[in-house]
Each structure stands twice: as structure tokens, then as C-alpha cells.
Image (spheres, rainbow, N blue to C red):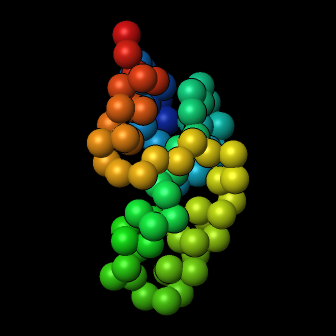
Amino acid sequence: MVNNRDYLQTQSKIILGHHPIYSEWIDVELLAVMKPSLKLHELNIANRTSELKKIAFENWMDLSDAIIYDDWESFSNLISKYTAT
């Protein structure tokens, strides 16, 4: 991602996954921090190894002030709200 920083900075809208620090790394404005509900998150990581599940859960917990969505339709609606031009 950092290697593509110049390209990403030319885009009008970017959806970054994982952690808000990435927006600082590529110097773009962060509009919102979102995460799935714990139930949806657990479904998303169900097939990972126990080590990767632990990392994913810790990352999920670190986003304590995030907007939580319960399903993909809610996520899509939130994205639409923040990306409307």
C-alpha cells in the first residue's frame, strides 16, 4: 500500500481495510472508521487458524470508537453515506 501511495493519493475515494493508521501512512483523509459486529467478524474469520483469529480479534478490539455494522447491506449503506459526491 505504501508503495502505491502516489497512485492512491490521486484517487477521489479510497476504502482502506484493517486499521486507520493506513490513512496516515499514505496521507489521505480518514472519513470514518467502521467494523463489523462481533458476530459478523467471527463469521468472517471462522476459517482462519487460531493464531490468525487471535490477531484479527485484537485488531477488532483496537477499533473501539468504530461505527459497527451488522450485515453487508448496512456496510454498503454506510459506505454510500461517506462516498456520496
Can residue 3 be seen at all in this image of the molecule? Answer: no
In terms of image quadrants, where is residue 80? top left
In terms of image quadrants, where is residue 27? top right
User: In the image, residue 60 lies at what x, y percent?
Assistant: 59, 62
**With 73 as the anchor, is 16 left or right in this view?**
right
Could you tell me which residue is drawn at 57 percent across and 42 percent down?
Answer: 67
Residue farthest along the top direction in this orientation: 85
Query: How many tags in the picture?
Result: 0
State the quadrant of the C terminus: top left
Q: Would you place residue 13 above or below residue 3 in this image?
A: above
Q: Would you place residue 9 above or below residue 71 in this image?
A: above
Could you tell me which residue is drawn at 37 percent across and 79 percent down?
Answer: 46
Could you tell me which residue is drawn at 46 percent across and 24 percent down?
Answer: 82
Could you tell me which residue is drawn at 37 percent across and 41 percent down?
Answer: 74
**With 18 as the anchor, is 4 left or right in this view?**
left
User: In the image, residue 62 lies at what x, y percent?
Assistant: 69, 59
Viewer-nearest residue: 57 or 20 = 57
Can residue 68 be seen at all in this image of the molecule? Answer: yes
User: In the image, residue 71 lies at what x, y percent?
Assistant: 35, 51
**With 61 as the anchor, is 40 left or right in this view?**
left
**With 33 as the anchor, is 46 left or right in this view?**
left
User: In the image, residue 21 lies at what x, y percent?
Assistant: 65, 46
